[in-house]
Structure formats: structure tokens, C-alpha cells
Image (cartoon, rainbow, N blue to C red):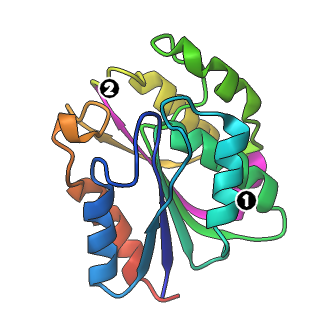
Amino acid sequence: MRKVFIVHGYNASPTDHWFPWLKRQVESIGHQCDILYLEDSEHPKYDTWKQNLVQQIQTLNEEVIIIAHSLGCIASLGFLSEVLAERKLFALFLIAGFKSKLPIFPELNVFIDQAHFDEAQLRMGICHRVLFFSNNDPFVPAPFSIQLGHLMNSQMVEVKNAGHFMASDGFSEFPQLWDKLSVLLKSTP
């Protein structure tokens, strides 16, 4: 049995967007899934979010999959850079991920500056890396996601006209993600 953790982003909660739907999908085929809670998502602080991840991700091994959305990608990459030195992670899915400062959200600059991650260590420590981006994301321009995808040597999947993969963009379900994730969940541990 694999364990899936879903990490939300800025201004979000565990009950938003496609997160509950994906949890149901994962559990329906016999795997475990937790949607993590990150404190004060309207005013995120990197150290607080990193501590939230440390507290909620008790198991980290080759049976674990992390799926992160938006700012949750930066928090997850920073967290994983610190804890993956002697371990391996089965898979990481980055949804609308980025590493650079976003012109539209200068209030996130301090958070982004504090998140340090080692791309080489992450590439070696994560067996499967997949990044989803949209051609019309109003918050994270596609080149920002593509840059991160190249740094992580990720498989990159473009979803046309998906916006920021939020419920307001029509993403209360995320079948494109499920198509990729379900293949990994069905592979033999």
C-alpha cells in the first residue's frame, strides 16, 4: 500500500479545489491519502509551513507520493531537501510549481527567498517527478513552471486552459493528474 500526501498552496485549505476528490480516488483503490493542513495560508510563513510538513509527514520512504500545488510546491521542495539525504521518495507531483518570485504576489517574496532546495539531491532522491502546468495560468506563468521542471528533470504535462488548477478554473476534479498517479499507484511496490 502506498501513502499519498496532498499539500495545498497559498490561500487554500484541505477542502479546496480537487484535493478531496483526489483523496477519494486514491482511497477507492486501496491506498492511504492525507490532505495536509498548512497554517495561515492567507499569510504563509515558510518556517511554519515547513514545520507543519515535518509534523504531518511521519513516514517518508519509497512507498510515499507527495502531490503539491502552487506555493505548496516550494514548501515541499524545501522540506524534502532537508529530509531526503538518506531516504528515497517514490514520486513527487508538482502542480503549477515554481521557484522564482511571482510579480503578481510580492507578498510571497520572503517565503520564496527562505526556501532553499538542492535540485541535484532531489533528483537523486525522488524516483518519479511529474510537473503539471497550464498555458494560461494567471498566477504562475508557464515559463516559471517549465524552468522548475527542467531543474528537477521532471516529466512535464501541459494542460491547456487549466488556469491555476483551482475549483474556480473548473478543477474540482483533476482527471489528468489521476491518469498519471493511478499508473504509479497500480505499480508493484
Q: Amino acid at mark 2?
A: Asp
- The picture places residue 161, in percent across and down from the top left corner, at 20, 31
Q: Position of 170 compared to 10: left or right?
A: left
Mark 1–mark 2 distance (CA, rounded to whole Å): 29 Å
Q: Nearer the viewer, residue 64 or 56?
A: 56
Q: Amino acid at mark 1?
A: Met
Mark 1, residue position: 124
- Dot 1 falls on a residue whose secondary structure is helix
Q: Is residue 152 visible?
A: no
- The picture places residue 158, in percent across and down from the top left corner, at 32, 39
Residue occupying the point 72% across, 35% down: 115
Residue 129 part of the magenta segment: yes
Q: Which residues are magenta?
A: 120-135
Residue occupying the point 58% across, 22% down: 108
Residue occupying the point 19% across, 35% down: 169
Q: Position of 160 compared to 124: left or right?
A: left
- Dot 2 falls on a residue whose secondary structure is loop
- The picture places residue 65, in percent across and down from the top left corner, at 52, 68
Residue occupying the point 25% across, 55% down: 176
Mark 2, residue position: 137
